[in-house]
Image (cartoon, rainbow, N blue to C red):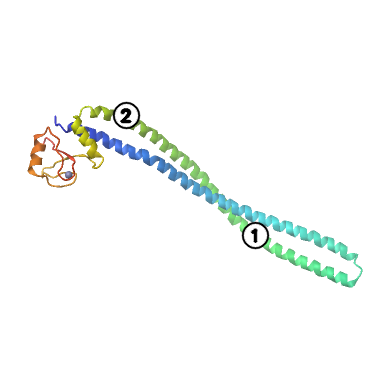
Amino acid sequence: MNAIQPLIELQEIDDQIRELEREEKDIPRRQAQERARLAGVNASLASAKEELDALRARIKQAEDDIAERREKVRQMKIKQTSLKTNREYEACSMQITGIEQEIESLIARQIAANDGVPALEARVAEAQKKSDADQGGVDDFCGELAERLSSVKEELESLRARRKEATSAIAPNFLAYYERIRTKRWPAVVQLNQECVCEGCHLVQPPSVQQMVQRGGTLVACTMCGRVLYRDSEF
Ligand SMILES: [Zn+2]
């Protein structure tokens, strides 16, 4: 058997581990992204509701102000009948007219505010619908991601056990070299192709390297990138 074969097998396991570790890191990020999006949807619902509440409060305030002024006018008109002089009567009439003008402008404002209600109500309803729909969708999606995450963790656990087993079949000096180079280069073990080129960095290797790779039995590294070189037996 090719002396490098156990390293190639280890690299295959490491390749799967790397892939799964990436996914393991990525899943919480995707969940957070989904929740942030939902928070944005809920924030626009909250702001539409706030606007509607504020508008209704303004309408209510105008109603109260109108009622208060009407009551005042009613009492003044009663009082007016008992006034003794013309001057007093005229002064009271002027006051009443002033208040009635205030009532007119309050009514105008109230009508304008009322006109704004249906559009805001529609906005709230639409935002509520979107929030309800997204809430379910995000919950489902985050649930699926959580399930995937737990199976990724299980797969990783079993791959790490397989890795431990695989390393025991490798000569310590080969393994030490591989462990060092794999942190800098990936894949760490590559073919020396028929043109005598390292398939990691694409540099042509000197004939001595080619001879050593062909002879086998020793660990031969690319003179440029340091990757472990091997050659398929069919070449
Ligand atoms: Zn190379």
Indicate the secondary structure of the residue bearing disc 1.
Answer: helix
- Residue type marked 2: Ser
Vertical side of 167 occupied by 46: above or below? below
Could you say which is closer to the camera, residue 74 or residue 219? 219
Locate residue 84, reporting x and y percent: 92, 68
Quadrant of image for the N terminus: top left
Furthest toward the bottom, the residue is 87
Q: Quadrant of residue 51?
A: bottom right
Numbered circles on residues, count: 2
Q: Which numbered mark, 1 or 2, is in the foreground of this view?
A: 2
Residue lying at 80% horizontally and 59% vertically, measured from the top left: 71
Locate residue 14, reporting x and y percent: 27, 35
Does residue 19 appear left or right of residue 218 in this picture?
A: right
Could you say which is closer to the camera, residue 228 or residue 30? 228
Cα separation between marks 1 and 2 = 66 Å
Q: Quadrant of residue 187?
A: top left
- Mark 2, residue position: 158
Vertical side of 103 occupied by 189: above or below? above
Could you say which is closer to the camera, residue 190 or residue 57? 190
Residue lying at 20% horizontally and 30% vertically, measured from the top left: 172
- Mark 1, residue position: 113
- Residue type marked 1: Ala
Q: Quadrant of residue 69?
A: bottom right
Which comes before the other along the chain, label 1 or label 2? 1
Q: Is mark 1 within 8 Å of ligand 1?
A: no
Residue lying at 15% horizontally and 31% vertically, measured from the top left: 3
Does residue 111 appear left or right of residue 130 in this picture?
A: right
